[in-house]
Image (cartoon, coloured by chain):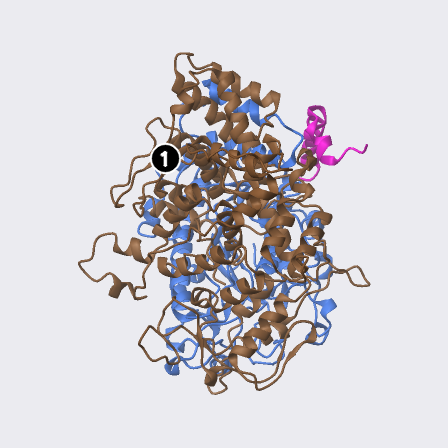
Chain colours: A blue, B brown
Amino acid sequence: MTISRRQFLKSSAALALLEQISRLDALAAPLAGSDYRALVCVFLFGGNDSNNTIVPTDASGYADYLKARGNPATGGLGLAQSSLIALPGVNYGLHPGLAPLLPIWNAGHLAMQFNVGTLNRPISKAEYANAANRPESLFSHSDQQAQWQSAVSSGPSRSGWAGRIADLAGSNGALPLIISTGGNNLFAVGNATTPLAIPANGGIGLNGFGSNPTGSPLFGAMTQLRGLDAGNQLVQAAAGTMNRAIAASSALAPVLTGTSPVASLFAGQNNSVAQQLHQVARVIGARQTLGAGRQIFFVSHGGYDTHTDQLNRQATLLGQLGTALKSFYDALNQLGALSQVTTFTQADFARTLKPASGGGSDHAWGAHHFVMGGSVKGGTYGRFPSLVLGGADDVTNEGRWLPTTAVQQYGATLASWLGVQATDLPKVFPNIAAFPQANLGFMR
Amino acid sequence: MKWHGISSALIALALAACGGGGGDSTTPSSGTTPPPAPPPPGASVSEPDALRLLEQSSFGPTDASLAAVKQLGIAGFVEDQFAQPATGYQGFAFLDANSNVGCPTGSASNCFRDNYTPFYLQQRFFQNTINGKDQLRQRVAFALSQILVISGRDIGQPYAMAAYQNILLNQAFGNFRDILYEVTLSPAMGDYLDMVNNDKPNPARGTEPNENYGREVMQLFSIGVWKLNPDGSQQLDGKGKPIPSYDQDVVEGFAHAFTGWTYPPRPGVNGKWTNPRNYEGRMVAFADHHDVAAKTLLDGRQLPAGQGAEKDLSDAIDSLFNHPNVGPFIGRQLIQQLVTSNPSPAYVSRVSAAFNNNGQGVRGDMKAVLRAILLDSEARGDRHDEVSYGKLREPALFAVNLLRSVGGSSDGVYLRAQSATMAQDVYSPPSVFNYYPPDYPLPESSLQAPPFGIYDATTAFARANFVNAVLAQNGIAADASVPGAVGTRIDWAPWLALGGDSNKLLDRINLLLFHGALRDDVRAGIKQGVDSVAATDSYGRARAALYLALTSPQFLVQR
C-alpha cells in the first residue's frame, strides 16, 4: 500500500523531521530583512464599482464617463463632477465617500493602480475573442474572488498568494503569519500553513475553565480526544482547527480583550470594516509582545454587488471604507507603524460602465485599486482605460475593461516589499514571468 | 446577488444578542414513544444503521425516532417521512415594506426587530426543526435553502422569508422544475436577485436588463459553470480543459428573457409597472416591459422573437431544467448536505440517474432523488470507515442535533443567536453563495468540505462555548422581550437517573450521539474526564460526559 503525504505526516517522527526541514527551508529562504512589516488586504466582496470610485476630471474623460453612465441630474448612474474629491496633481477625483483619504493622498501615502485584473498573460482585445486566452469563468463572483486571492487564473488553486508567502516564511513567533478578521478565505490558505481567523471584534477563548484551563482534568481530556481518531481526515481537520485556536488564544486573548490604545480613533464606527481594521490595529500594536516579524491580515468588507440602487448603496459602503481606512492610517501612525504596514484593496471585479435596469451595474473585469501606507510612493500607476462603450478597452459593449495590469504584478509588488526575494516570486506567483514587470513601482 | 463580508455575520449576531421568540412552548421530543406495532416483513434494521439514517435524514436521532425506524425499516421510514405534512411558517402577515409605516413613532420597542428582521422566523426554524414530525422535509428544505439562496440580510421582512421558505418546504418532495419555477417567480427572490422590475433595454436611458438573476440561476441554482458528466466530474475538451456551461451571451439571453416582471399587486389594487413591494404570491408580468427580441439560451437554443414574458420564462426554465448538468450538480450538493462531503463519482451517478428518470419516465422527482441518496450503499454501508467519509455538522444542525439527541426544549431564541455566532445565521447567509461553497477545500488534503468554510478558531470556540452554556443545569433563561418565551434547557432527568455512572453515561452517549460507533480510545478519554468529577455529583458527571462528547472532533463530523 502506498503512503499518502497526509498519512506520512501523521507519524510523529515524520513530523519532527518535517519541522527540521521547514526550519532549514526558513534559513535558506526567509523573507528579507529583520524589521517588522505587515500587509493588510481589504477585500471588497461583491465587486466594487471602481468606475464611480475614481473618475477622470479632465473634460474629455469626464464627458466619456458621463455619456455612458448617464447624467445624475436625469436619473443616470454618473456622479456630478462637483461632488468628486479632486486630487491635487492629477486629473482624477474620488467618490465623495472617500474624502477622508484626501490627506493621505496629500501626504504622498496613497497610490492608485488603474485597471488591474485577472489574467494568465497580457492579452489584446483581439486575443480576447479566443476564449482559450481568457482567465476561466470571467464575471463569476466565486471564480474571480478565487483568482484574485490565489493569483491563479487557469485551473483551480487550493492555496492563496498570501498563504504561499506564509509557506515560504516558515515559523513566525506565537501566531501564524496570516490573521483574518474576515473568516476563512483562499487568500490566506497555504499548501503547508493554515491561517488564524479571529473575531471581527472581541476576544477568543474557551469559557468555563477559569484562568488556568491546563490545570483542569476536563481540559486535559479534551486535548487528548483531539489526538485520537487519526483515521478520518475531517475529524483530524476539526481537531487541528481547535488545536491552533487554543495555541493562539493564550497569546492573543490579552491583546484582544485589554484596553485598545487606538479605540478613540475608531469611536462611533460600528460597521464591520471599521471593527475589523480596529482589531487589526490592536494586533499590530502588540507586535513586539507577540514576536511577529512579518504579518499579513485579511479584512472583508461586503455588500459591493450593486446590481440595483448603486448610488445609495455604494455611497454608504465607500463612506464606511474611507472613514475606516483613515482611522486605521491614524492608528498606525500612533502605533509607530505607519511605514511598516501597507494596506491595499482587492475585489471580485469592477462593474459595467453601462447601467443595468434598476439603477445599478453588472459584473465586469479590470478595476482600480488603492494602496496606502508610509512606504507607498503616492500617485497613479498603470493606464486608465478609455471610458467608451465598445471602445478600445471594452471587451463587450457594456464597459468591461480588459486589464492592463495583472493581479500577479500587483501582488508581487506588495510581496516583494514584504520581503519575498525575487528568486522566490515564482513560488508565490507561478506565472509571474508571463508579465513584463514583476514590480509596478508603487512601493519604496 | 448581494454580498456581505463573511465576518459581518459575527457582527450581526453581536447586535442581535437579545433573543426573541413566537411563544409556542416546546416539548422535549425524546419523551414520546410511538405505539408499538409489529415490524413489517423485511424491515429488519440494525440499531446503528437506524441511528445513522436519522443523522442523515433528520435533525438528530431521538429515542422516539429510533423506535420509528426500527418499526418501519429504512425504506419504510423514508416513505413515512414523505407522507408527513409540512410544518411550515404560518401567521406572518403582510406589512408595508417601509418600516416607518410599519413601525411608526410610538410603536413597541421591538417593532423593527419583530417585523423587519428574520428574528421570529429564525426562532420558528429552531422550534420546527427540534419538534417537527416532518424531519426529512425540514432537513431537505434547509438543504435547498442553502442551494437556492435568499438572505434575511436583504429580505428582512419575516412574511417575505416565510413565503419563500414555504415554497421549499412544500416542494421538498415535489419536482425540481416546480421548485425552479416557483423560486423564479417568488417576489422575495425577485427582490434578492433583482429580477423584479427588470426592464427591457432602454436606449434612451442607456440601460440594459439586469443580469443578476439570469447569471446566478445558472451558476448556483441549476447547472453550474462547467459541463458535467453524470458522475459530477467535469467534461473535458480535446486539450484536457473543462468546458464552460455558458458564456456571457447566454447570461444576457437569460437576463433579457427574465424582463417584464414586477411585484404582485395587493388585493383590490390595480397593478402597474412597477408595483410597490409585496412578497405574497407570484410576480406578475407587464408586456410593455418585456423584451420581445430573440434570445440565446443554453447550448445554442434560441427563444424566438415575439414571445410574451410568461412563455419566455417558462421556456427559459425548461432550458435550465432539461440541461444534463442538473442531476449531478444538484444531486451532488444534496448528498453533501445530507450524507457526506466527498461522495464517490459512482454514488453521484446513481443519484443523477434517479434525477433523470424516477423509473416512470419522470425527470426531477425529488422523492426518487432522496431515495437514491438515503438508500444508497454509500449512505448505508461500510464506507463510513474511510478516511474521507462524512461531513462536518454545520452549526444549525449541530445545535438542533444536540437538543434533540441529548433531550431538551427550546423556544429557539438562544439557538438562533448562537447559530449566528457559530457563523450560520439561519436563512441569512452573507451572499447568494451561501455560508460556504460546495467545493470548499479542506486544508492540507485533496478533499472538499463545505462546512469547514465557516469553521475556524473563532467559530471553534463559539461551538465549545455554546455547548458549555447550554449544559448549564438550569439552562438558558427565557428572553423577557419575547412573548411566551420559555428559554432553552436540557432535560436532565434521564441523565441524572444514571447516577453518575460513567459507563452508563457513555453507553447512552454512544447510542444517541455516535450511533453505537464510539471508538474505544475516545470512550476511554471521555471516561477519564468524567471520572475526575466526584462520583456523588451526578449532574457534574453527566455534564462532563456530554461536554467532552459534544465538543469532540469525533462528534463534529457526521459519518
Callout 1 crowding tier (Cα within 10 Å): few <14, some 14–19, many ≥20: few
Measured as percent of width and height from the top left, residue B556 is found at: 54, 35
The range drawn in magenta is A1-30
Find disc 1 in the rendering and name its residue: A258
Rendered location of residue B108, percent (x, y): 21, 54
Q: Main secondary structure of the magenta part?
A: helix
Asked if residue A11 lies in the magenta stretch, the reply is yes
Name the spot of residue B18 as percent of width and height, x first: 31, 44
Q: Looking at the picture, how far across and down is residue B222, in whole percent?
A: 60, 62
Residue visible at 59% across and 56% down in the picture? B366
Along the viewing direction, whichever of A338 and B3 lies nearer the viewer: B3
Q: Is residue A236 above or below residue B538?
A: below
Res A112 seen here: no
A82 above or below B150? below
**Secondary structure type for disc 1:** loop
At horizontal 40% and vertical 77% (from top left) the residue drawn is: A81
State the residue lying farthest toward the left.
B106
Where, by quadrant of the figure, is residue A13 drawn?
top right
